[in-house]
Amino acid sequence: MPNTEEILQTGGSSELVDCGVIPHPVPAREWPILAVLVSIQFIHILDFTIMMPLGPQFMRLYEITPQQFALLVSIYMFSAGIFGFIAAFIIDHFDRKATLIVLCGGFSVATLLCALAVDYETLLAARAVAGAFGGVMGATVFSIIADIIPEYRRGAATGTVMSSFPITSVIGVPTGLFLAEIMDWRAPFVFLTIMGLLVIIAALRILPPVRGHLIHQRDRNPLRQFQKIFSNANHLVAFILIAMLMFAGFTVIPFISPYMVVNVGMSEADLPYLYFFGGLSTFFAAHLIGQLADRYGKRRIFCIVAILSIIPIWLVTHLSKAPIAQALAVTTLFMVLVTGRFVPAMALITASVAPHVRGSFMSFNSSIQQISAGLATLMAGSIMGVSVTGEMTHFDAVGVIAIIATVLCIYLSTKLRSNEELTTK
């Protein structure tokens, strides 16, 4: 019988731990692995997130409209969605460690292309290349978590890896904006390229092979696997849940920085504070929410956090001229609750699928997630406009749409079942 150490080193499924055959996992061995996964998520999220506070610069530099800026943000997500969908047919046929390292390499090249862009069109193309690698990379990270972390600790592990978002906000975005200020907007992307190369070296040394899922892939037809995933009603609920969750978030998130500068009165120099305080608070909240999800149930905690998140969605999209302290309080609460609801949601979703199709499922999930976010951004951009005084308009209507989508997410979470619940019936 394999021990826990062997499971972590060979990438075997955590099913043995979950069912009690191996009662004493070795959390100390998981921390270096989680640190690498957090680092990968850090560069992936920073690459996407840095575009939003740089939005006012891009709109001024290239003289683009909110709709064109929305396309600059959403092209990444559409590319991630399309290539994630394609990758889903083959991703479960390879060692997840090798897959992740190859994706990191391609992603580093893509961030360098962003730094070398000479105009709006070439930057748009470079963002599409970055999305092609970044979306699949994120899906692979969560597949590895689900494969090597036992279910009863998966909420906390998911929260740990998702803490990469607040770390990005606290450290990455302010650093990127500082580099952009003392040099130019290209500097953050050069920084990301260097970080990507360092993460690849760490992944080669620390990550164990993750091959346990391969024993289920012999002679498996990708089209039959596609049919198996999408013919499962529980999987469809999971897909719709993540689609609505992303839609609810990305109708608002990409436009917060431009809105705070143009409508609320924050200066571009104040934007690092927005991400610093929001990220710092979210860092602690993500861990707490993950622990609460493991203790009291992922579904219950998700519903509570999602209900609470309606408050800052309303506040941030209806805010007018305000002191910086008030603006930071509202955006910090928004980041804590809107980001925090993803922790129990991702734990619910990863638990809803059997291990042998988890890689393909998560790649499809990531694809749907990215396309939904892209559509949300484009839709919000098409609703919003610019007044004669230069202010952004109709952000309040966008907030109402985000709230309706959040309520739908709460309903969908009550219909989603874990793979364990389904197999024990």
Image: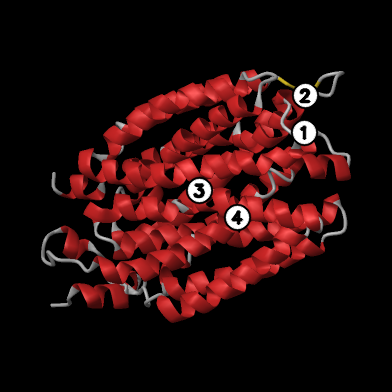
Check disc 2: other Cα within 10 Å, few if <14, some if 14-19, many if 20+: some
* Tag nearer the camera, 3 or 2: 3
Q: To which quarter of the image does residue 66 belong?
A: top right
Report the residue marked by disc 1: 66
User: Which comes sooner in the sequence, label 1 or label 2?
Assistant: 1
Q: In this view, does 108 lie to the left or right of 249?
A: right
Against 68, residue 230 (above or below) is: below
Amino acid marked by disc 1: Pro
Q: Give yes or no for contact between labels 1 and 4 (Cβ–Cβ under 8 Å).
A: no
Q: Residue 385 carries which label?
A: 2
Above or below 47: residue 347 = above
Judging depth in this view, the residue of 85 and 391 nearest the camera is 391
x and y, in percent, of residue 236 in the image: 39, 41
Residue with the mark numbered 3: 166
Place of residue 266 in the rendered image (x, y in percent of width and height, measured from the top left):
71, 31
Residue 49 visible somewhere in the drawing: yes
Counting residues from the start of the chain, the first of labels 1 and 3 encountered is 1
> Which residue is identified by label 4?
172
- Please state which of the two labelled residues, at mark 1 or mark 4, is closer to the viewer: 4
Query: Against 141, is 306 above or below?
Result: above
Give the crowd class for mark 3: few <14, some 14-19, many >=20 residues within 10 Å: many
Question: Which residue lies at the image location 37% right of the left edge and 53% below the top edge?
Answer: 158
Residue at left offset 62%, top offset 18%: 318
Q: How far apart are marks 3 and 4 (CA)?
A: 9 Å
First along the sequence among labels 1 and 4: 1
